[in-house]
Amino acid sequence: MYENGWGCNLRRSIGIMLIHQKPERQKVCQGQAIVEFAVVLPILLLLMLGLINLGVLINAQIILTQAAWEGARAGTTLNPNLGEGDAEITGTVQASLIGLSDPTSVTVNISPDEVTRAAMSWPKPRGEPLTVRIAYPMNLALPLPITITLGAEATSRIEYSN
């Protein structure tokens, strides 16, 4: 019906074996199918690995965004005059990083820092923005050593006053 140059029925490659083929043709067709599979398999594996890595990257980005928001929210209610500061914000961020492969490699930057927030005159810092930025270097599961730095940022208004 549909034949290529070797006389192989193209329906053979999708698993339908025709009984009336000669044994020599069946061997040629089987060899052709194996070669086609060997050519297509690496491409399919790379696509599948890429999709898995994409899912892992999206998951890590969601975790980082949530952790940045949690840190900003915690920082807006802290009062540096009571000894509360950046260590509590960083601790909140670290506690929110459940699910990352290496949460200790996360870098947390807080703006303004606790010294600047404590030095703000009355009625500040109430209503001022507090920004938490997170950076996370992530290694991809590829045959090549590729590292991508993911980042997240959250800003919230400070709720306490000096």
Image (tube, rainbow, N blue to C red):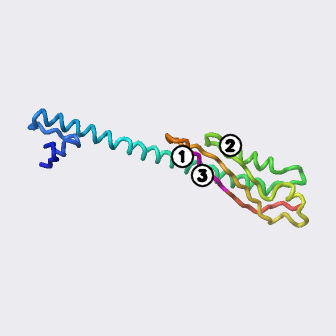
Secondary structure at badge 1 equals helix
As rendered, which of 58 and 49 lies closer to the eye? 49
Q: Residues within 10 Å of mark 2 (few under 14, many from 20)?
A: few
* Residue 77 position within the rendered picture, expressed as x and y whole percent measured from the top left: 80, 56
Residue type at mark 3: give it.
Answer: Ile
The residue identified by callout 2 is 105
- Res. 158 image quadrant: bottom right
- Does residue 52 lie above or below 128 as drawn? above
- Mark 1 is surrounded, within 10 Å at the Cα level, by few (under 14), some (14 to 19) or many (20 or more) other residues, namely some
> Magenta stretch?
146-152
Q: Which residue is mark 1?
A: 56
Q: Residue at x 60, y 45 (%)?
A: 138
> Residue 41: x percent and y percent?
35, 41
Labels 1 & 2 near each other (Cβ < 8 A): no
Spatial distance from mark 3 to mark 2, Cα to Cα? 17 Å
Image: 22 above or below 94: above
Alpha carbons under labels 3 and 1: distance apart: 10 Å
Amino acid type at mark 2: Ser
Res 65 quadrant in image: bottom right
Earlier in the chain: of badge 3 and badge 1, it is 1
Query: In the image, what residue occupies the spot 42% across and 47% down?
Result: 47
Closer to the eye: label 1 or 2: 2
Q: Residue at x 21, y 36 (%)?
A: 30
Query: Mark 1 or mark 2: which comes first in sequence?
Result: 1
Horizontal and vertical percent position of residue 43:
38, 45
From what the image shows, is residue 23 above or below residue 153?
Answer: above
Residue 91 drawn at (x, y percent):
75, 45
Whether residue 115 is situated above or below residue 141 in the rendered picture: below
The label on residue 62 is 3
Q: CA distance from mark 1 to mark 2?
A: 17 Å
Left or right, 25 with reference to 77: left
User: Horizontal placement of 2 versus 114: left or right?
Assistant: left
